[in-house]
Image (tube, grey):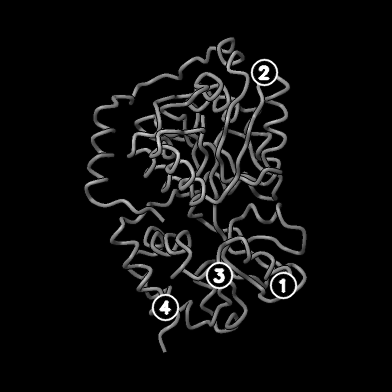
Amino acid sequence: MNRINPRAYAIVAALWLTAGLSNAQGQTVDVAAAKKDAKVVVYGSVVPQAMEELHRNFEKKYDIKVEYWRGSSTAVAERAQSEWRAGRPAFDVVESSWDVMTLMKMEGMFTRYLPPSAEKFPEQFKEKDALITPWRILPISILYNTELLKADETPKSLEDLLNPKWKGKISIPDPSRHTTTAKFFWNLEKLMGAKWREYVKGLAKQQPLLVESLAPVTPAIIKGEAQVGIAYIKFVKQYKGPVSYVSLNKYLSDPNHLDLGAKAARPNAGRLYIEFAVSADGQRMIAQDGEFVLAPGVFPPIQGAEKVTPNMIPMDNPSEDEAKSLSNEFRQIFFAK
C-alpha cells in the first residue's frame, strides 16, 4: 500500500503543475543509440515466464540483451531505492505498482519519458508528469471453482458474498497484512459509498479463509478449500484448474507502470524497451499470459475480457496515516473476539 504523507502529496502536485505535459507528444527513440547501449537492465514485478516472449522478441528485433531481475513490488522498490541511495543504481528501467512507483518518483529516481505508443492509452490511467508510464492493469473480481459451482450458482456481485450460504466458503487475503486487499476494501467506497465498512464487517462474519496475498486465493479455490474468492482475473489464465471469474458491472483495478531511471547507464536502450513494451505488439505479447493491458483492442485470452477492460476503475492509494489506520481497523474487524 502507498505510504505517502501530506507533504509528499504536495510534492507530487508541484511536479504535475510544473511538468506542463497536458499536450505533450511522444518522444521518438534513437534506435541506433539504443543499440550502442547493447543491453538494458530491468527490475520488475512480473514473473519471468510472463515476460519471456516480450524479452525474446525485443532482443531479436534490436540485438539488445535484456537483464531482468524479478521481485514483488515491495522487493523491487527496496532494491532500487537501496542502490539509488548508495549512489550506485544498476537499473535502467523499473516495472512495478503505482504506489511504490510514486515513492521512488518522489526521490527523483526517474526521468521524464513519454513513449509514442502510450499516447493512445485511456486518459484515466495516464500520469500527467510522464515520469511513470502505465502499461498493464490488474482488475479484481470474484473467482470460483467451476466443478463445485455452475455459473448460475455463483455470486452475481460483491454484495452477494454476504449471503449466508457462502459462510466458510470464501477465501480472501488478510487485509490487516496484505496492503493491496486493504486498498481494495478502502476503494469499495467508489462502488458502495459509505456502506463499504459495513460490507467489510459483513464479509468478516462469513468466516473467510484468510491467506497471505491474492495469489494463494486461486489455489485454495482450485483445491476446493474455498468455493469462491476475491482475486485478480488474470489468475484464471495463469493457474491450471477448474477456475473462472464472475462478470461484474465495475472492476476495481490496480495499474502497473514502467519508468526510466534518472541515472540509467543505458538510457536509450531503456527508452526503447519501454516503447516496445507499450507498443501494440508488445502489449499483445504480455496479454497472452492473461495480463490486461492498455493498448486499444488488445485483450488477454480470457472469456469476456473485452467487456472487463472498459469497466475498470483505477484504485486510489491511501496516505501513510490512512494505511496504518486501515491495517488496525481490519485487524479489529477480522480478529477481535
Which residue is identified by label 1?
149
Task: Give x and y (percent) for residue 280.
Answer: 62, 28
Residue at (70, 44) in percent of width and height: 289
Q: Going from the N terminus, do you reach mark 1 or mark 4 first?
A: 1
For mark 4, what is the residue? 201
Q: Residue 172 got which mark?
A: 3
The CA span between labels 2 and 1 is 48 Å
330 horizontally vs 92: left or right: left
Residue type pointed to by label 2 = Tyr
Sooner in the amino-acid sequence: mark 3 or mark 2: 2
Instruction: Label 2: state its secondary structure.
Output: helix
Residue receiving disc 2: 62
On the image, the x and y values in percent for residue 6 come to 23, 50
- Crowding at dot 3, Cα within 10 Å, few <14 / some 14-19 / many 20+, comes out as many
Q: Gap in Å between the C-alphas at discs 4 and 3?
A: 14 Å
Q: Secondary structure at mark 4?
A: helix
Q: CA distance from mark 1 to mark 3?
A: 18 Å
